[in-house]
Image (cartoon, grey):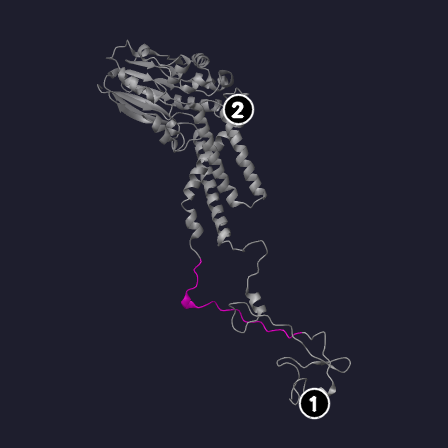
């Protein structure tokens, strides 16, 4: 099944690259030209960077190499997505721009187009060979065969014959007149018809202007290709800027029926999906710490997917997280990416950074509620999956319970165990539109606050990005969840 999925993904990527090459390279360049060669090379090389970016970490490649291939490889994947989407949108315009407006043929009432004026026929050159005649043939100025007539000799409409050097007369013989081409005006000569007919280069096909035929199609293809490149590049550039400038701060108030008055207004800073890795490093972690500390939270909850890589490679990048500041400290639960990166090592590293891991366990917060955390569902493949009974089984259900769980799909277990509020991440809000449509198929809630029975679920869009460091339609966030007591 896994192999089938991999083959399907490779087939989709191959089809997408062929389509982009066809519209951005083949349709707008001339065969064999330098532009076509350069475009073809780019469409072959860039996917290799993308494959290297997605596999280098799993293959334990040197971290420096991961950084080198990740930026171009992941950015190309984002650009490819929006090139394909934009080009597909232009397919609706292509037939209209190519065929409209068409040249209007003349109506029968308008008659044929006027022909150009016939050129004056040049007088024919004298014949090189003369026909000798005896003096007796010229009587009273007559010519051969025309004895007794006055005027010049020779055929009507031609000048008289020149005398031959030996005293005879050379008759001028005109070159044979060829019939005019079919459809030519009456009186036009063959030369006139040839002058009016467009000249064609043998083997070159019809010569068409930029508004007709192939010229028009290529012009339209270039305009649409340029538009697609501009739109896709602008979208990806803005999406990368959205990630690199750091997450925005959201504030959400959640009323809880059992929350005591003493906890009214309690602030929990929810941070998910930081994704420290080859593209987002120490500076990214520092931006998050600064944004969180500026909210002056009572408690910080890091709900998984902190890293994409080993402690050895990313330990220095995570060091700023030791500067989190909150009245009741900071807590951490694992996400699926921790298990891809060495969960045990990262749990120890997080503890060294001053955060408390909650591994299927619960703590009582002095404000008057329980805070529980469960391992991510991906941990089940490593013998370290979620255990709701261990975390929540023996608690006092008269107390409010807030659960930290990386994936929203855990909400159904939370409802069964009487949790009042679950805080999650994982979805990234879709990260890049239309990714939110796919995220909705796999998650009960993609972002924001929703209610499931007596349990409320809040899903953060996350503070970082996975894969392409790009967000479109789902900006990164840190959420300050303010608890509200209905008894207050």
Q: Earlier in the sequence, mark 1 or mark 2?
A: 2
The outermost residue toward the left is 487
Disc on res. 113: none
Vertical relation: 70 (above or below) 22? above
Q: Secondary structure at mark 1?
A: loop
Residue at the disc numbered 1: 139
Who is closer to the viewer here, 367 or 259?
A: 259
Residue that extends furthest to the top in the rendered view of this protein:
394
Residue 300 at x, y percent in the picture: 37, 18
Q: Secondary structure at mark 2?
A: helix
For the C terminus, the quadrant is: top left
Q: Give 173 or 9, whichever is nearer the viewer.
A: 173
Answer above or below: position of 397 versus 440: above
Q: Is residue 452 above or below residue 328?
A: below
Q: Quadrant of residue 288?
A: top left
Q: Characterize the magenta stretch by its predominant secondary structure.
A: loop
* Segment colored magenta: 103-124
Residue 407 placed where, x, y %? 36, 21
Which corner quadrant holds the N terminus?
top left
User: Real-space Cα distance between discs 1 and 2?
Assistant: 111 Å
Contact (Cβ within 8 Å) of mark 1 with mark 2: no
Q: Position of residue 69 (x, y in %)?
A: 53, 27
| Residue occupying image coordinates x 52% and y 73% | 186
Q: Dot 2 corresponds to which residue?
A: 66
């Amino acid at each position: 099944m896994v192999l089938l999925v991999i083959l399907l993904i490779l087939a989709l990527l191959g089809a997408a690259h062929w389509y982009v090459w066809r519209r951005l390279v083949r349709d707008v360049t001339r065969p064999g030209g330098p532009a076509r060669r350069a475009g073809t090379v780019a469409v072959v090389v860039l996917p290799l960077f993308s494959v290297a970016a997605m596999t280098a970490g799993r293959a334990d490649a040197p971290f420096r190499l991961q950084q080198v291939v990740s930026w171009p490889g992941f950015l190309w994947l984002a650009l490819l997505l929006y090139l394909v989407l934009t080009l597909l949108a232009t397919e609706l315009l292509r037939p209209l721009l190519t065929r409209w407006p068409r040249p209007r043929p003349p109506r029968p009432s308008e008659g044929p187009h006027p022909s150009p004026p016939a050129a004056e026929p040049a007088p024919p050159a004298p014949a090189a060979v003369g026909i000798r005649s005896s003096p007796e043939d010229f009587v009273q100025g007559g010519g051969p065969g025309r004895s007794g007539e006055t005027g010049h000799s020779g055929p009507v409409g031609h000048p008289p014959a020149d005398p031959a050097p030996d005293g005879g007369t050379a008759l001028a013989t005109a070159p044979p007149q060829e019939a005019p081409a079919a459809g030519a005006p009456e009186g036009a000569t063959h030369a006139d018809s040839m002058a009016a007919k467009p000249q064609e280069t043998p083997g070159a096909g019809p010569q068409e202007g930029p508004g007709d035929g192939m010229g028009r199609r290529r012009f339209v293809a270039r305009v649409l290709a340029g538009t697609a490149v501009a739109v896709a590049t602008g979208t990806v550039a803005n999406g990368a800027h959205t990630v690199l400038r750091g997450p925005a701060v959201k504030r959400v108030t959640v009323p809880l029926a059992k929350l005591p008055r003493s906890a009214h207004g309690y602030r929990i800073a929810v941070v998910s999906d930081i994704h420290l890795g080859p593209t987002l490093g120490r500076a990214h972690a520092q931006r998050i710490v600064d944004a969180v500390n500026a909210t002056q939270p009572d408690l910080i909850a890091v709900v998984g997917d902190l890293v994409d890589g080993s402690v050895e490679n990313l330990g220095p990048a995570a060091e700023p997280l030791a500067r989190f500041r909150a009245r009741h400290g900071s807590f951490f639960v694992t996400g699926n990416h921790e298990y891809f990166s060495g969960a045990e090592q990262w749990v120890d590293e997080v503890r060294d950074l001053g955060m408390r891991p909650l591994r299927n366990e619960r703590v009582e917060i002095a404000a008057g509620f329980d805070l529980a955390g469960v391992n991510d569902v991906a941990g089940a493949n490593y013998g370290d999956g979620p255990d709701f009974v261990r975390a929540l089984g023996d608690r006092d259900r008269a107390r409010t319970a807030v659960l930290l769980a990386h994936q929203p799909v855990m909400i159904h277990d939370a409802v069964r165990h009487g949790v009042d509020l679950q805080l999650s991440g994982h979805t990234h809000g879709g990260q890049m539109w239309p990714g939110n449509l796919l995220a909705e198929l796999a998650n009960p809630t993609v972002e924001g606050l929703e209610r499931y029975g007596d349990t409320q679920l809040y899903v953060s869009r996350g503070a970082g990005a996975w894969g392409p460091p790009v967000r479109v339609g789902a900006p990164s966030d840190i959420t300050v969840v303010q608890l509200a007591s209905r008894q207050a």
